[in-house]
Amino acid sequence: MKTFDLKEKIVFSPEKPIKRHFLNAKGFHAALICLKAGVELPVHPEDYGVLLTVLEGKGVFTDVNGSRTLARSECIYIKKDEIRGIKAEEDLVVLGIQDRL
């Protein structure tokens, strides 16, 4: 068994999102994404699906269906090759589980 203290991985930049991978397993990767309030991860496509779960804060998440605000304990799944973007309304910490199959 391997355990992770995610609080130790929380780092903010006033200029850009900080993404910290902490687990690369067969079929999926896990990362912590930290955005200071006002910081944005521009809308872009990716070649993997991802489950994004808000651990702290609040932000606007964009996918092919539009934009919606998510807060603590809420999540969104975005399919492979679909667009995704995030804008932090508050300091935001997101757990991303990437589907690599």
Image: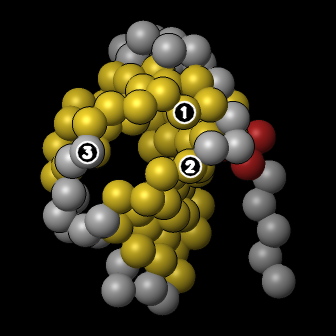
> Label 3, label 1: how many angstroms apart (C-alpha)?
14 Å
Other residues around mark 3 within 10 Å, as few (<14) / some (14–19) / many (≥20): few
Circle on res. 65: 3
> Label 1, label 2: how many angstroms apart (C-alpha)?
7 Å
**Precedes in sequence: disc 1 or disc 2:** 1
**Residue 32 visible in image:** no
Q: How is the image coloured?
A: secondary structure
Choose between 78 and 2: the one closer to the eye. 78
Circle on res. 25: none
The residue that disc 2 covers is 75
The residue that disc 1 covers is 70
Tell me residue 87's x, y (percent): 38, 23
> Looking at the picture, which amino acid does disc 1 mark?
Leu
Other residues around mark 2 within 10 Å, as few (<14) / some (14–19) / many (≥20): some
Q: Secondary structure at mark 2?
A: strand
Tell me residue 13's x, y (percent): 48, 19
| Tags 2 and 3 touching, CB below 8 Å | no
**Precedes in sequence: disc 3 or disc 1:** 3
> What residue do we see at 82% from left, 83% from top?
1
Tell me residue 29's x, y (percent): 48, 70
Q: Secondary structure at mark 1?
A: strand
Q: Quadrant of residue 82?
A: bottom left
| Tags 1 and 2 touching, CB below 8 Å | yes
Q: Quadrant of residue 66?
A: top left
**Does 78 sit left or right of 7 as displayed?**
left
